[in-house]
Image (cartoon, rainbow, N blue to C red):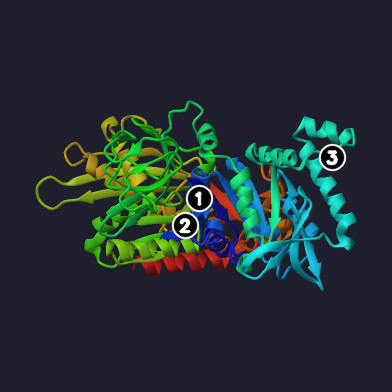
Amino acid sequence: MRCFTVLGPSQSGKTTLVKAMSQLDGAATRTETAGNLALTRFNFLDEPWCAFDVAGSAEYSGVMGSVLMASDAVVLCVPSDPAAAVLVAPYLRVIEASGTPCLIFINKMDAPQGRIEDIVAALQGYSQHTVVLRQMPIREGGVVVGAIDLISERAWHYQEGEPSFLMEIPSSMREVEHQAHLDLMEHLSEFDDGLLEQLIEDREPPTAELFQTAAKVLQDNKAIPAYLGAASHVNGVMRLMKALRHEAPSVDALRARLSPAGDVLAVGFHAEFQKHLGKAVYLRALTDGVKSGTNLAGGNLGNLNEFGEVGSNALAAGSVGVAVKADQLNAGRLFNAASSQDGPDWVKSRRPTLARLLLPTNERDEVRLSTALTRLQETDLGLEVGQDEDSGHTILRTQGPLHLRRILASISDDFDVQVRDELTPTSYRETISQQAEEHYRHRKQSGGSGQFADVVLIVRPQERGAGFAFDEVVKGGAVPRNFISAVEAGAQDATVSGPLGFPVVDVAVTLTDGKSHAVDSSDHAFRTAAKMGTREALQKASPVLLQPIDRVDIHAPSVFSGSIVSLISTLKGQVLGFEPNPTARGWDVTRILLPSSSRDDLIRGLGTSTQGTGWFESKFDHYQELHGKEAEAICREHAKERA
């Protein structure tokens, strides 16, 4: 079986393209949807094929990576509009990182929005590989009615819903077509010394030899050929499918790329949780011998069914199957008989940025929610689950709003757990801006042994990021040595919640003096005295609110860098600079400092400013003082929540 992935932005027509490709032979097809992936099995010229159609959103970069791990080639479906090339940029980036041989299909040529040369040039701006045009459109009255193959120099006239028929190249196009043919040969000669020698000697290479060179260029992933058509009319689809058949590499090439040692038997390229069935893992066998009852990834491969084949529980090399009740298998991994290993780095999804607190509607469902999230993490490479350090509630991190909605729907529909999501609270802190001294005496007498502790404390601010520090300069044993540790613990207790209601950071406490009682003093008494004394001192020391500041790297096509700078200024961020991405042509990395409270606004604003192509990585950098009405409003709101 040959397998390929079809990628492209929303509204590019990729699902229509898959349908058209699968129905070329008129044989029965089998399509199955698994979450954000649709698999279609079909026959073409008596050969079995499987197409993977990934949902059209850049949020599914993790799905793209794992599915490409099971693909011999990828078809990138793009709109016939130069302005839409930027929407294709995220897909080109994933494809090039994976090293998967790629063919471009410029779709919707029945209503093009620009010249084909401009479309190819715009795409080239985001590709490290040379984009080589393999066809030229034929126009009549401004309408594309056919295409010329630039290798064979034969022209084909489209027919609605029917195979194209051979036609003469229009006389008005012969000169420009021949020049395009020569340009194509020059591109191919960059990768073939024999072809280069023939061109230098002004000899016309045989057509068969040119096709062989083109196939080798694709199989070696040296260039990206571009075809054109209109999938909704089945125009150009046969030519694209024949290019896949004759030029795309086989599963043997995929195995050599993923498993230099030759020990990988199969890849897990997708997984989903199915109600009443459990985890289903989609496999592609890279060699013969993967079947029910054998060992895979260190466990028994029990229930395995070949996709599209009733009753078949053995996979030939290249075939796709679905395994259930095999907990040792997961998506994004490579399997041999005894163990499994992570796929290449490009398989991993980018770090999720949209964070939400996840709370069960019924508190009794806490355990069931935890179980559901654990199972979903096993099937979704782009999902992260953590815990909010302040509230202790579960934090769900997803790739974006579409991804979030899908996860919430799965929790409800597949696991019967009702949940609500809330914004994650910003982790504000507080510190002090000046030194203060406090003399505090703790005395309590209520029958029996009493409590007595007397401490003199100095509280002072420290440099940002220094944390909490304690020391003592007590003389003459005024506070016995065995109580010093209790004083330190009490002072630290007071920093859990300061005068403004937030954890206190970057303060130092010094014990300078005190008194004790031979009978009534104890660790508890001195800990209490230190806690209360530190609280009083913090109140006197002019507390200030601190907001967390993140260091953020924004990845986006270069054309959007200006709008990103404008966006950051509205979010009260600071642009540190930007530079071209060294591994992604046409992309910039913009480095900024941004208040953590603005992260959700950044997600929304970045989606608008970059037409959904941009994304970012962030990590905590430092705390920064916040004053004025904004700080007062935050403190008031926090006080209401605590009341």
Whole-percent x, y for residue 408 in the image? 38, 63
Viewer-nearest residue: 461 or 558: 558
Task: Give the class, few, some or many, for how many residues have Cα within 10 Å of label 2's Cα (few <14, many ≥20).
Answer: many
Viewer-nearest residue: 281 or 589: 281
In the rendered image, the vertical position of residue 357 relative to residue 196, given as above or below? below
Quadrant housing residue 565: bottom right
* Residue drawn 51% across the image and 28% down it: 260
Give the CA separation, mark 3 to mark 1: 34 Å
Q: Is residue 103 visible?
A: yes
Residue type at tag 3: Glu
Whole-percent x, y for residue 16 in the image? 56, 65
Residue 40 disc label: 2
Viewer-nearest residue: 159 or 295: 159
Q: Earlier in the sequence, mark 2 or mark 1?
A: 2
In the rendered image, the vertical position of residue 415 relative to residue 196, given as above or below? below
* Residue drawn 46% across the image and 42% down it: 318
User: From the image, which quarter does the C terminus lie in?
Assistant: bottom left
In the rendered image, the vertical position of residue 485 relative to residue 130, given as above or below? above
Relative to residue 522, is residue 291 drawn left or right? right
Give the residue pinned by disc 3. Answer: 204
Q: Nearer the viewer, mark 3 or mark 2?
A: 3
Give the CA separation, mark 2 to mark 1: 16 Å
Task: Give the class, few, some or many, for how many residues have Cα within 10 Å of label 1's Cα (few <14, many ≥20).
Answer: few
* Residue drawn 76% across the image and 40% down it: 188
Viewer-nearest residue: 348 or 182: 182
Give the residue pinned by disc 1. Answer: 46
Q: Earlier in the sequence, mark 3 or mark 1?
A: 1
Q: Nearer the viewer, mark 2 or mark 1?
A: 1
